[in-house]
């Protein structure tokens, strides 16, 4: 429709009614007044965009914007590239095999995983299994879990969108899968915490222990463990009660009573 | 998973180990294939996302990232025991943060599945329709303006039977111990 035309104009009504698909049929009698009316319904004058006669609008002398004196642009206003609005006519985009975003999709590179595919998972790692792993392995496993959680979250959002009003199955399976992943992550943190406490306890014990030198430079050749040479009877099976039961010791001092003797006499 | 190459942007000194959050990729068909949108934690920044995508997904990104926070609408909380009267638990759930990123290489999402049979979409729809039909049949609310035709026809038949003497009226609808009514099905 031309820009100056309104949908209620009689000429538009005529062209709409008397289309080639319709054979020679005159418009119904009740529509005849529409053709009689020649003026538009709106009484205000239609205003089109005015031409802006200011060539230097938006051009800044301070910022040095705008075209140079003899600068020619490669594109003319009349020759601008037009976007292809119809998605079927657009060129097919070739997606890189190793694109990073594939990490958000299932292994089969489908849009979302089916409930069956979601259900094909094992159990979480146990603490006992992870105790034998070093930091690098645990770190790698953590990030594998994070990527899997991201992938499941992406699937869930898309599945909810595609499900529409009534929804689709797959909620329970995804939930179970995520629970296993979270279990693994929990166990990794458990193992690392355990390790840290063991290290901390050892460090504190080492600080107390006279035989251990924590400031030793082990790589430099110094020894961290320096056992004291006391002889062969270093093993003592003593207890805290030895001072009391040892016959060679003197008798312990008497327990002093808190009540004074003067108070007792008075009573 | 290979270690990421040297970042093309300036990196900071802070090292982060074992973070626990989720970044989700959103489907945006109206955006061109060279852009991608993510749902990120609310405390996330653009620099965080750039670093995350580089290190975790080896994703090369254009110069700018756009972000916005979407506020949630106020809604009622779950009522766990509908029998007891409770406060309405009106609250505004946490807002969500979305970030849009320009990609160096375009990415098109895989096609939608043609048949939703593995997800039982049709069955869900049918179940929902069955349930609403059943609720209508049961009579609906007391102040329902319209009564379903099926029920009206049945009521007419029952009234006719009573008037013609084929059935006898009993108090309580003749509901016995088993719960069978006057006009047992």
Image (tube, rainbow, N blue to C red):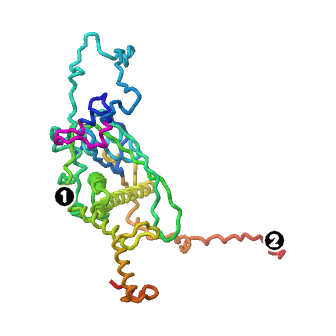
Element marked by disc 1: loop
Label 2 chain ID? A
Measure the alpha-carbon separation of dots 2 and 1. 103 Å
The picture places residue A250, in percent across and down from the top left corner, at 59, 71
Q: Residue at x 30, y 47 (%)?
A: B26
Q: Nearer the viewer, residue B113 or A213?
A: B113
Give the residue number, with chain letter if any, for mark 2: A262
Does A176 sit above or below residue B174?
above
Q: Is residue A215 visible?
A: no
Marker disc for residue A164 = none
Does A181 sit above or below residue B33?
below
Locate residue A35: give its quadrant.
Answer: top left
Q: Residue at x 27, y 40 (%)?
A: B31
Q: Nearer the viewer, residue A183 or A29?
A: A29
Give the residue number, with chain letter if any, for mark 1: B115
Q: Is residue A215 left or right of residue A104?
A: right
Image quadrant containing the C terminus of chain B: bottom left
Q: Residue at x 24, y 40 (%)?
A: A17
Q: Residue at x 27, y 66 (%)?
A: B126
Q: Magenta segment, which residues?
A: A15-34
Element marked by disc 2: helix
Check disc 1: other Cα within 10 Å, few if <14, some if 14-19, many if 20+. Answer: few
Q: Residue furthest top?
A: A69
Residue B22: say if magenta.
no
| Closer mark to the observer between disc 2 and disc 1 | 1
Q: Nearer the viewer, residue A264 or A245?
A: A264
Does B94 sit above or below residue B32?
below
The picture places residue B106, in percent across and down from the top left corner, at 21, 39
The picture places residue A107, in percent across and down from the top left corner, at 19, 54
The picture places residue A162, in percent across and down from the top left corner, at 27, 54
Locate residue B78: give its quadrant.
Answer: bottom left
């Amino acid at each position: 429709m031309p820009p100056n035309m309104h949908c209620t104009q009689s000429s538009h009504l005529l062209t709409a009614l008397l289309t080639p698909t319709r054979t020679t049929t005159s418009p119904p009698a009740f529509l005849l007044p529409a053709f009689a009316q020649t003026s538009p319904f709106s009484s205000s004058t239609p205003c089109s965009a005015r031409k802006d006669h200011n060539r230097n609008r938006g051009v800044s002398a301070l910022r040095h914007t705008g075209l140079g004196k003899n600068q020619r642009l490669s594109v003319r206003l009349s020759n601008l590239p037009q976007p292809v609005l119809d998605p079927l006519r657009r060129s097919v985009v070739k997606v890189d095999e190793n694109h990073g975003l594939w990490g958000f999709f299932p292994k089969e590179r489908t849009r979302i995983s089916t409930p069956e595919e979601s259900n094909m998972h094992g159990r979480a790692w146990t603490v006992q299994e992870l105790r034998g792993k070093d930091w690098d392995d645990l770190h790698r496993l953590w990030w594998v879990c994070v990527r899997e959680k991201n992938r499941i979250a992406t699937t869930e959002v898309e599945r909810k969108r595609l499900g529409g009003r009534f929804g689709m199955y797959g909620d329970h399976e995804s939930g179970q899968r995520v629970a296993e992943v979270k279990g693994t992550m929990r166990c990794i943190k458990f193992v690392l915490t355990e390790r840290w406490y063991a290290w901390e306890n050892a460090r504190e014990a080492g600080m107390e222990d006279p035989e251990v030198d924590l400031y030793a430079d082990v790589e430099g050749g110094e020894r961290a463990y320096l056992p004291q040479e006391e002889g062969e009877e270093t093993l003592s099976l003593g207890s805290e009660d030895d001072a009391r039961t040892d016959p060679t010791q003197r008798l312990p001092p008497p327990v002093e009573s808190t009540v004074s003797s003067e108070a007792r006499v008075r009573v | 998973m290979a270690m990421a190459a040297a970042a093309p942007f300036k990196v900071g000194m802070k090292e982060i180990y074992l973070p626990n959050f989720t970044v989700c990729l959103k489907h945006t068909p109206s955006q061109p294939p060279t852009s991608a949108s993510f749902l990120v934690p609310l405390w996330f920044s653009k620099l965080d996302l750039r670093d995350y995508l580089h290190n975790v997904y080896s994703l090369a990104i254009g110069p700018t990232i756009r972000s916005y926070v979407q506020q949630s609408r106020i809604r009622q909380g779950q009522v766990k025991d509908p029998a007891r009267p409770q406060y309405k638990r009106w609250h505004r759930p946490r807002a969500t943060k979305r970030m849009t990123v320009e990609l160096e290489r375009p990415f098109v999402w895989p096609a939608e599945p043609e048949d939703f049979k593995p997800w039982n979409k049709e069955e869900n729809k049918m179940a929902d329709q069955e349930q609403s039909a059943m609720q209508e049949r049961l009579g609906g609310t007391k102040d329902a303006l319209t009564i379903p035709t099926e029920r009206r026809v049945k009521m007419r038949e029952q009234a006719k039977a009573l008037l013609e003497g084929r059935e006898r009226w009993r108090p309580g609808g003749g509901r016995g111990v088993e719960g069978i009514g006057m006009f047992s099905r």
